[in-house]
Amino acid sequence: MTTTTTDEQALAKLQREHGPALLHFLLGLTFGDRQRAEDLLQETLVRAWQHPEAFDGPYDSMRPWLFTVARRLAIDARRSRQARPTEVGDIALESAPDREDSTESTVAALDVRQAVRTLSPEHRAVLVQIYFRGLSVGETAQVLGIPAGTVKSRSYYALRLLSRNLPGYSPSRSASLTRPSRAAASAITT
C-alpha cells in the first residue's frame, strides 16, 4: 500500500507563506493560548501533507483550505476538552491533601492529648463536657454540679492554657474550637 504525501518543498513553501497568518488566526481561536495554537498549526500542516490533492484544487491560494481545516481542528479540540474533566496542574496536585493520609490528624491528636494532660482535672472536665460531648454551659453546670459562671470561667482559662501548650498551633485556632475532630475527642477522653 503506497500513500502519497505532499512534497516537502511545497509544504515548506506553504508554511512560509501562510504559517504566520494561520498562527495568528489560531491564537484568536484559542484565546491567546500559544501552545495550543502551535499544536493546531502543526496538525493543520500535517493534514496538508497528508492530502496532496488539496494543492491541485481549482483555487489560486491554499489559504482558505488551510483556515477551514484549522478552524475545524480548533473546534474539535475545544469539544474534546469540554467532554473531559478539567485538567489539573502539578502544583494543584502537590498542594492537595491526601485523603488516605491520616498522619496530620494523628499528630494533632497526640499534641492535643499531651496538652490536655497539663490541665487540671476541673478544667479538663469542663472541656470534655462542652466541646467533646456537645453540652451547653447550663447542661455542663448541671452535670458537674457547679454554677454556670464557673463553667464559663474554667472553659475560658482551659482554652487559654491549651493555646499556650499546643506546639505550632495559633491561639486563635484553639480559642475558636466549636466541634473538635474525633481524633482530638478521643485524645481528651483517654
Image (spheres, grey):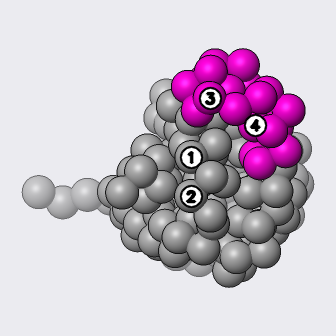
The residue that mark 2 highlights is 121
- Image coords of residue 86 (percent x, y): 57, 41
Q: Earlier in the sequence, mark 2 or mark 3?
A: 2
Which residue is rendered at x = 73% and y = 25% of the image?
A: 137
- Mark 1 is on which residue type? Ala
Which residue is rendered at x = 76% and y = 67% of the image?
A: 161
The residue that mark 3 highlights is 145
Q: CA distance from mark 2 to mark 3?
A: 14 Å
Q: Is mark 4 in CB contact (under 8 Å) with mark 2? A: no
Q: Is mark 1 in CB contact (under 8 Å) with mark 2? A: yes
Asked which secondary structure carries label 3, the reply is: loop
Secondary structure mostly seen in the magenta stretch: helix
- Residue 49 visible in the picture: no
Above or below for 93 versus 44: below
The residue that mark 1 highlights is 125
Q: Is mark 3 in CB contact (under 8 Å) with mark 4? A: no
Residue nearest the viewer, comparing 139 with 171: 139
Asked which secondary structure carries label 1, the reply is: helix
